[in-house]
Image: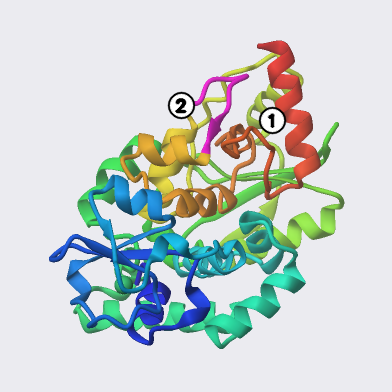
Amino acid sequence: MENEIRWKAVETNDRRFDGAFVYGVRSTGIYCRPSCSSRLPKRENVDFFDACADAESNGFRACMRCQPASEVPAPQVAKVIAAAELLDRDETISLSDLADEVGLSPARLQKLFKELIGVSPKKFADSKRLERFKEGVRGGAAITDSMYDAGYGSSSRLYENIGNKLGMTPRAYARKGSDMQIEYTITDSDLGRLLVARTSKGVCAVNFGDNDADLETGLRKEYANAEIERNGANLKDFVDAILHNLDGSNPSLDLPLDLRATAFQMRVWEELRKIPYGETLSYQKVADKIGKSKSVRAVAAACAANRVALVIPCHRVVRSNGDVSGYKWGVERKRVILKREAARE
Ligand SMILES: [Zn+2]
């Protein structure tokens, strides 16, 4: 499914995508702009590149006919493609997070997306979800497995290896927490109200919020089929550890976890837990470290899907230029946490 938008643009010689990317044809060593009228190459021979320089550093020469190097860059179109790919990997991402991630306003993204792709981001996400699910079922995979595997190229072995390491149980993902018994508590922190929830295995949610009602609604939505009870008796140690992490007296927050996740998310989260207190990494660096250099946007989506603030330190991932980018619990909170960690390192 990756690069589906780009391939479609090439198939239809869609001029509107010129400047947003180029494609190299491995059998000829030539790279072209999307609208090039040369013969349509076989899909399996095609590599996509964001810029001509990338194509050239991979050994491709510019096509004489369409002269891709003379094209004016189209960054907005590239952003829409990036948004579509993000949605392809994580259909649950909100429009505002999506817009934030690609650097457009939500209204602008909505409009451009509709123009270029033909449907709204929401419709696109819905169709992706359905497509992915059907493909998995057709292939004979168990339904719950197909929900994870789709789009991630992962195997059950990957789940086992990483799941064991992190103490996460991917199967619980599809079941929305059925068989899970969850206890939670909500307490004050200096970054707002703090919800901490656990199962018998470990922490399953850490969320900041502005009021208790929203936090509770969020938890019940996340784990719609779980038995959920407000009871802080067994949570005191976890809450203390988290609060002391916030005030700087407990830098290593090594709590047991019980999380729903895709295999890809787990790999990213495991990598995030290795980032030391007081340090940050770019999305690109995280992608490199998990051996998926091209999956920068999927890494960003996995950060956005984190369920446990601080415990999995997604706040330590920033843009390549050092800018603090989106944070599930508010960019302002992310700024404060990073500032403190840097000061106390
Ligand atoms: Zn060409």
In the depicted structure, whether residue 135 falls above or below residue 233: below
Residue located at (53% from left, 81% from top) = 124
The nearer-to-camera label among 1 and 2 is: 2
Q: Is mark 1 within 8 Å of ligand 1?
A: no
In the picture, the quarter occupied by the C terminus is: top right
Say whether residue 104 is left or right of residue 319: right
Figure quadrant of the N terminus: bottom left
Q: Which residue is mark 2?
A: 274
Residues rendered magenta in the picture = 275-282
In x, y percent, where is residue 321?
61, 35
Disc 1, disc 2: CB below 8 Å? no
Which residue is nearer to you in this view: 13 or 173?
13
Residue toward you, 16 or 343: 16
Instruction: Label 1, secondary structure: give it.
Output: helix
Between 317 and 241, which is closer to the camera in this rendering?
Answer: 317
Question: In this rendering, does residue 122 appear at all?
Answer: yes
